[in-house]
Image (spheres, rainbow, N blue to C red):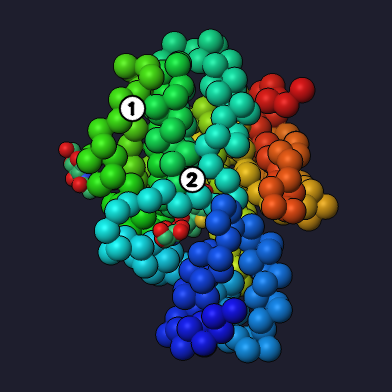
Amino acid sequence: MSEESTLCASSALHVLLLLVQQSELAVPLRSLQKLTKAQRRHHTSLTNELIENMDKKATWDRFYTENGSKGQFKNFEWFFGFHSVQDLILPVLQSMSHSQSGPVNILDMGCGTSALGPCIYKTSSCAVKVTCADISSVAVKLMEKHANSTSAQPCNPSSALAFLELDCTQLRGYFGARSLDLILDKGTTDALVRSKEGQDKAGQILKQCLQVLKPSGSLLQFSDEDPDARLVWLEREVRGATLAADVGVQELGELRGVSYFCYQISPCTSEKVSK
Ligand SMILES: C[S@@+](CC[C@H](N)C(=O)[O-])C[C@H]1O[C@@H](n2cnc3c(N)ncnc32)[C@H](O)[C@@H]1O
Ligand SMILES: *[C@@H]1O[C@H](CO)[C@@H](O)[C@H](O)[C@H]1NC(C)=O
Ligand SMILES: *[C@@H]1O[C@H](CO)[C@@H](O)[C@H](O)[C@H]1NC(C)=O
């Protein structure tokens, strides 16, 4: 256990990076909290600072800066990558594309440096317009630079890929009402609901999502939070929203002992993704 380096670290971000580097595949936020609980005797203030500030741009800019300077760009995935959810996402895109003429309009909300958005762009046989948005300008620039340097070709020639620096509590300022088909959230709401001042932001984001989604659209939250907690939170937030919505969940399975879920939030008139 490299406690020394952790203790010497000048910022809580190093604790996160250390934990991240110890886990090869994924970063379940829940086990992050478990690990940090065990270390709390030693790192109370550091870990608290970290978990409390997962809603802050500065936290994430520092997180993504750590590696940005270290040569080769590498996508970083929370929980899991595109391959784990492609069988869920691609059929949804197909069915959405059949019921409309233009490209399927997709937002990866809080994309970080995940390959999820670029992979959808590369893999989807139906036309998609993928926007990868994050509050961290560092993450967005890394993604854009990488996309520019690789200039990956889409499966469908009409598909488009864009990167956007955006605070997703302000979605309405950027996206028109009822303009998006699918919003993907992998770990973003998880980070917000677990931080000190993030709960309200997570609620705001959910409400804005409902406004910018088409009536036939859906928000998918990929999460390691238990339905006992997340469904209660979602139901409560949806009740407080002006637009009615259906909330559902499906279990995605287990990875390294952690269960993952996909929460689906859809404006009431729409059909559900899961059977
Ligand atoms: C747990 S990470 C997940 C990153 C990415 N989705 C993935 O799967 O690897 C949470 C992300 O949410 C972003 N974020 C936090 N608050 C945000 C906000 N208000 N608007 C947009 N992005 C935000 C952070 O910068 C960070 O990249
Ligand atoms: C940083 O780089 C290491 C080594 O390549 C990698 O394992 C880790 O996932 C990277 N972290 C981020 C935040 O990109
Ligand atoms: C990526 O390419 C576009 C179009 O050529 C350019 O406007 C943008 O500045 C580039 N971004 C980065 C980060 O290099």
Rate crowding at label 1 as few (under 14), some (14 to 19) or many (20 or more) other CA atoms within 10 Å: some
Q: Residue at x 47, y 75 (%)?
A: 14
Residue under label 2: 109
In this rendered view, identify the residue nearer to me: 205 or 52: 52
Picture quarter containing residue 32? bottom right
Residue 150, position as x, y percentages in the image: 26, 37
Q: SS for tag 1?
A: strand
In the visual, does 187 lie left or right of 111?
A: right
Disc 1 residue lies near ligand 3 with CB under 8 A: no
Residue 84, position as x, y percentages in the image: 60, 37
Rate crowding at label 2 as few (under 14), some (14 to 19) or many (20 or more) other CA atoms within 10 Å: many
Can I make out residue 140 in this image? Answer: no
Q: Residue at x 60, y 86 (%)?
A: 43
Q: Residue furthest front?
A: 1
Q: Amino acid at mark 1?
A: Ala
Q: Earlier in the sequence, mark 2 or mark 1?
A: 2
Picture quarter containing residue 11? bottom left
Q: CA distance from mark 2 to mark 1?
A: 16 Å
In this rendered view, identify the residue nearer to me: 272 or 252: 252
Q: Which mark is residue 160?
A: 1
Disc 2 residue lies near ligand 1 with CB under 8 A: yes
How many badges with numbers are in the image? Answer: 2
In this view, 158 is above or below 79: above
Q: Amino acid at mark 2?
A: Met
